Image (cartoon, helix red, strand yellow):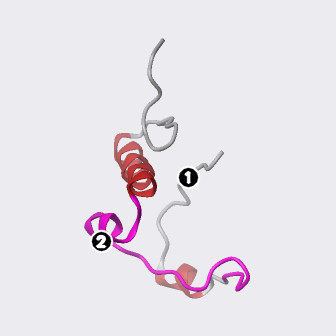
């Protein structure tokens, strides 16, 4: 599983308190959806785009490999 969790909006003071684990993450930044599309592979971007859509529509989305599961 690779869940995406909505952590809510961050104030500048919240961002200043972010501590990354150097063995796991070398750096981070906040980007627009357009920038994310250029930076991520297709599957990762599909997850980010779906998460943003879920956030703005107050819904939950389930994806398998970046795509909605096929109905049987």
Q: How dense is the environment of label 1, judged by Cα within 10 Å: few (below 14), some, or many (20 and up)?
A: few
57 and 38: which one is in front?
38
Q: What residue is shown at x 47% (from left), y 83% (from top)?
A: 12
Q: Give the x, y percent position of residue 57.
A: 35, 40
Label of residue 4 in the image:
1
1 and 13: which one is in front?
1
46 magenta-colored? no
Q: In this view, does 4 lie above or below 19?
A: above
**Chief secondary structure of the magenta portion:** loop
Q: Are the residues tagged 2 and 1 within 8 Å (C-beta)? A: no
The quadrant of the picture occupied by the N terminus is top right
29 magenta-colored? yes
Label 1: element kind: loop
Q: What residue is shown at x 62% (from left), y 85% (from top)?
A: 17
Q: How far is mark 2 from mark 1, CA to CA?
A: 18 Å
| Mark before the other along the chain sequence, 2 or 1 | 1
Label of residue 51 in the image:
none
Q: Give the x, y percent position of residue 71.
A: 45, 16
Q: Quadrant of residue 32?
A: bottom left
Which region of the structure is painted magenta? 20-41
């Amino acid at each position: 599983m690779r869940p995406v969790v909505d952590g809510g909006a961050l104030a500048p003071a919240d961002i200043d308190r972010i501590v990354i684990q150097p063995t796991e993450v070398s750096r981070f930044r906040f980007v627009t959806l357009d920038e994310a599309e250029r930076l991520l592979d297709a599957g990762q971007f599909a997850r980010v785009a779906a998460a943003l859509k879920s956030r703005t529509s107050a819904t939950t989305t389930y994806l398998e490999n970046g795509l909605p599961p096929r109905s049987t």
